[in-house]
Amino acid sequence: MQKLKLGHSDLMVSRYCMGTMTFGTQTDEHDAHRQLDMAREAGINFLDAAEMYPVNPVRLETAGDTEAIVGRWIASRKPDDIVVATKITGAGSNAVKDGAPISATRMRDAVEASLRRLQVECIDIYQLHWPNRGSYHFRKVWGFDPSNQKRDTTVAHMREVLSCAAELIAQGKIKHLALSNESAWGLGMWLHLAEAEGLPRVVSLQNEYSLLCRLFDLDLAEACVNENIPLLAYSPLAAGLLTGKYAGNVTPEDSRRARNPDLGGRITGRVFEAVSGYMAIAHEFGLDPVHMAIQWTCTRPAQTLPIIGATTSAQLGHILAGRDVVLPDEVKGAIDQLNRAMPMVF
């Protein structure tokens, strides 16, 4: 698999990043390790986790289990060029006692806990799962209201986190700080403070991005291109919608939708019409819809790396089979036309 330099960092990572959020709930440890072996054999050296994982559901009692499963794989396989990303949970999560927000104190403790679970000496990319001030992601865009945000409080918090990251980098506990579920204003402010005060510059942004979720495409895409900030695109298959398995509004047994009926707000009155359109494009050009959806993310103007994930090793094998697919310009043109006709379907 193609390797590329991640933004302004010195990290060489695979084009695909391997997501792990179901490891410990829908995916047991045996199959999780099998999936990691498959990813490794396919040339993937980039793994993404989080202290709050596994999901479906997220619970305080299971938070950290995914990192521990990944850590036991790392300890047993000892891969020499693995790049590990994980996240500190944002404010209000039930995966953290009392929903504590991100702070320097909690960040130091969370890094130590992740290092122990992952069984590594240094975390390559340490991400803020979502900002303390809130986020328009997770389907909150429809009622997003930033008027209650306090700029001075936010800036002071950012300065505190960047200073803590500088300490952790100096101690060899993390290599890079990164963001997730951020906005263009937030990204710009993190970058401004880092430059103005000689603090660590964030290395990447992890936001949801797919044929069905294109909030990134305007201001954030411009910011990321100009500032050389790669997008780690999570849910490139829109939580399974773009596989076609939910077409006709069905719910396969033991699927993600069986545990989360509206797929985190993605099931709307228009979504299946859009899915049908993308299925039709794939069929017209003789493409597998899974391969088309994932490879499309690799064609975008900003450096974009899809985070792939699967409940089973069989599903992962299907995804990996399309890693060398190239999308003709005609396919990309048809996709653009459909997006103009049916934007923002969830």
Image (cartoon, rainbow, N blue to C red):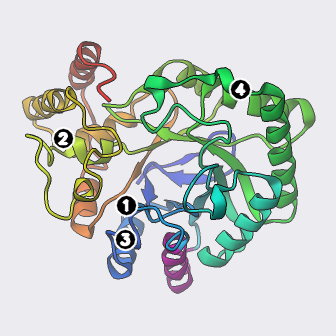
The image shows residue 172, relative to residue 121, as above or below, that is above
The image shows residue 270, relative to residue 19, as above or below, that is above
Residue 288 magenta-highlighted: no
The image shows residue 253, relative to residue 118, as above or below, that is above
Quadrant of image for the N terminus: bottom left
Relative side of 275 to 179, left or right: left
How far apart marks 1 and 4 lie (CA) works out to: 32 Å
Amino acid carrying mark 4 in the image: Gly
Identify the secondary structure beneath mark 4: helix
Amino acid carrying mark 2 in the image: Pro
Residue occupying the point 10% across, 36% down? 286
Judging by the rendered image, the residue that carries numbered circle 2 is 289
Discs 4/3, front: 3
Q: Which mark is residue 56?
A: 1
Q: Earlier in the sequence, mark 1 or mark 4?
A: 1
Judging by the rendered image, the residue that carries numbered circle 4 is 188
Residue 131 in the image, given as x and y percentages of width and height: 65, 41
How far apart marks 4 and 2 lie (CA) works out to: 35 Å
